[in-house]
Image: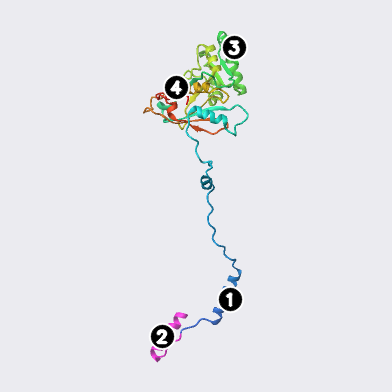
Amino acid sequence: MLAWRLVRSSTLSARTGLRPMLPQAAPFASARFLANEATAAVAAPPTKPAEEPKADAAAQATAAGSPTKSKRNPICTPLQAFEILRNRKDKPKFDESLELALNLTIDPRKQNEQLRVVADLPNGTGRKVRVVAFTNDPDQAKAAEDAGCDVVGGDDLITEMARTQQANFDSAVATQDAMASLPKIARLLGPKGLMPSKKLGTVVSDLAAAVKRAKAGSVELRADRAGTVHCGFGKLSMSNDALMENLKAIILCVENNKPAGVKGKKWVKSAYVTSSMGPSYPLNLIYIDPKNVRFMSKE
């Protein structure tokens, strides 16, 4: 409608020579607009001045000189790690176990880069080990009992364990004559790493020697999917010399069983020592390198 009026006014002005008259807004529109603006100004809350951003807590702690939780633990020698874990303030009341973590440059998905061996600890793990022996030979069973084995049995023991689905022991050894019946409890022993195996030295001809070896303290070294080996090697209450001997036995066992598919001389990327309830401390690799002059140095 407005466009039609403009065209008509232009046509009349061309004929008559008079100035065209444009439509004007109603006077009440401006008054309504001003009234709305006044109402909005009264209802709007007063604006607050912009606050300065607060400094980060970690930045404040760093500026004050105090350590933060994100700060990494320092690299240390094995003896330094033992002493730090012993003397920390948040140490629990019970005797903690020590654990070693080795990060290796291997891919366990490849057949020639897998690692699974058993290391004998000269000073034991510091805890009592329950051992079971599977054999159908009466003479072997008697020798195992004399060696201090906790449970000894043959097919009858295997059948009973298959029925109850309980395996209350820490290590298992067997003779070759009992291996034919062990598949009955393979699903029970396998996930716990207790299935006897020739590769691990737990299927033997001398059962008494195997029991003494397990009682003395031996740990299984097995790389997980990420190529990391986790194993315990003693208690905090043990002496530094005993812990160093156990740690040395583990390092040498890993080095002597290096997978054939691993290339390069240095295949240990990092190593950490931790306790049951404590933090982990990275080790200086020169102190756990058998080819270094400082290998297991007591510094």
Location of residue 141 in the rendering, given as x and y in whole percent from the top left corner? 57, 11
- In the foreground, 59 or 5: 59
Please name the amino acid that badge 2 sits on.
Answer: Ser
**Disc 3 designates what residue?**
145
Q: Is residue 114 left or right of residue 170?
A: left
- Residue 296 lies within the magenta run: no
Callout in the foreground (1, 2): 1
In the picture of the structure, the residue carrying the numbered disc 4 is 252
Alpha carbon distance from label 1 to label 2: 36 Å
The residue at the far left in this view is 264
Q: Which residue is mark 1?
A: 35
Residue at 39% in and 90% down: 15
Residue occupying the point 62% across, 23% down: 164
Task: Name the residue type under label 3.
Answer: Glu
Q: Identify the residue shown where x is 54% and y is 14%.
A: 212
Q: Secondary structure at mark 2?
A: helix
Please, what secondary structure does the residue beneath circle 1 have? helix
Q: Work out whether residue 181 can be spotted.
A: no
Q: Residues within 10 Å of mark 1 (few under 14, many from 20)?
A: few
Q: Position of residue 24 (x, y in %)?
A: 49, 83
In the image, the segment drawn in magenta is 1-21
For residue 111, side relative to residue 239 (left or right): left
Report how far apart the C-alphas of labels 2 and 4 lie in the structure: 105 Å
| Nearer the observer, 292 or 181 | 292
Estimate how packed mark 2 is, as few (under 14), some (14 to 19) or many (20 or more) residues with alpha carbons within 10 Å. Answer: some
Quick check: 91 above or below 218? below
In x, y percent, where is residue 243?
52, 23
Question: Circle 2 sits on which residue?
Answer: 10
Judge left or right: residue 112 versus residue 37: left
